[in-house]
Amino acid sequence: MAEGLRERAMRGDTVRGAMVFEFFSPGIAQILRLAGAEFAMFDMEHSGLGFETLKTLTATCRGLGIAPMVRVPRGEYHFLARALDVGAQGVMVPMVESAVQARAVAEATRYPPTGRRGAAFGFAHDDYAPGDVAAKMRAFDARNLVIAQIETERGLDAVEEIAATEGIDVLWVGHFDLTNFLGIPGAFDSPAYHDAISRVVAAGRLHGKGLGFMATDADWAARYRGLGFNVLAAGTDQGVLMNGYRAILAPLGEAAR
């Protein structure tokens, strides 16, 4: 992971990255780095991405100064610990809805004595290298970023308790799901949605946590940075590609036929 990324995220510094749903190619990490990203968030929740491919993707980030991270399907130990063991340096957990869930996520992603993550060294996550095990555990606990998504009405109701949980580093708003569960699908101008955003921001600031959001264009990125979100990912990758091609092809219109 880029040096100090977790600390910077929790301090409120702007941390830039990208969410990757579709283009799990060997060159994607370098392409994102050249675009200015500091992390790549590979999605396992909606994409069909598996652990073998994730392991390859994390390896392509080595030496580039870009942190490989992953959104796991759910906040269960066998997803979280395995994602970290194959090389992810951060995990995003969908639909965190209680302090109990948040504590379970924190335990699964931290080594003893603060957590319950199982030990395996000389593997992908430590670059197969020998070394002092106790020092490695301290270093990886300090490095790995743990993100709880607030994207349901239950998560919103418990956001203060989730934010207070030691081991949760970033609160990330899943904006589409949040509007769905608030009964206002896609209504991002709704007062209820704005109130929800304000509540998440306040909880994060109170407890010294980073605030995350995926922006689909530059206007959204600027707007949510202005609201206090500091861990910002561009996405979706398929949408970015489509818009780029459309910008070249659309002006041709009928002349192309």
Image: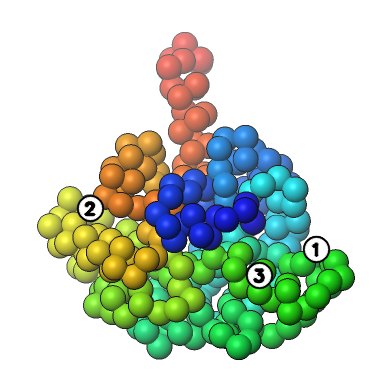
First in residue order: circle 2 vs circle 1:
1
Residue shown at the point (39%, 46%) measured from the top left:
215
Using the rendered image of the protein, determine whether residue 178 is visible from the camera's viewpoint.
no
What is the basis of the colouring in this image?
Answer: rainbow
Measure the C-alpha gap from mark 2 to mark 1: 43 Å
- Give, as a three-letter code, the residue at label 1: Asp
Quadrant of the snapshot with the N terminus: bottom right
Residue shown at the point (61%, 73%) measured from the top left:
141
- Give, as a three-letter code, the residue at label 2: Phe
Taking the view exactly as shown, the residue that stands out farthest to the top is 255
Q: Of residues 239 and 149, which is closer to you in this image?
A: 149
> Do labels 2 and 1 touch, CB within 8 Å?
no
Height in image: 101 above or below 192? below
- Dot 2 falls on a residue whose secondary structure is loop
Name the quadrant containing residue 76. Answer: bottom right
First in residue order: circle 1 vs circle 3:
1
Using the rendered image of the protein, determine whether residue 75 is visible from the camera's viewpoint.
yes
Q: Which mark is residue 249?
A: none
Quickly name the residue at label 3. Answer: 140
- Give, as a three-letter code, the residue at label 3: Phe
- Name the spot of residue 257 as percent of width and height, x first: 51, 15
Q: Of residues 64 and 56, which is closer to you in this image?
A: 64
Quickly name the residue at label 2. Answer: 188
First in residue order: circle 3 vs circle 2:
3
- Name the spot of residue 38 as percent of width and height, x first: 57, 47
Quickly name the residue at label 1. Answer: 127
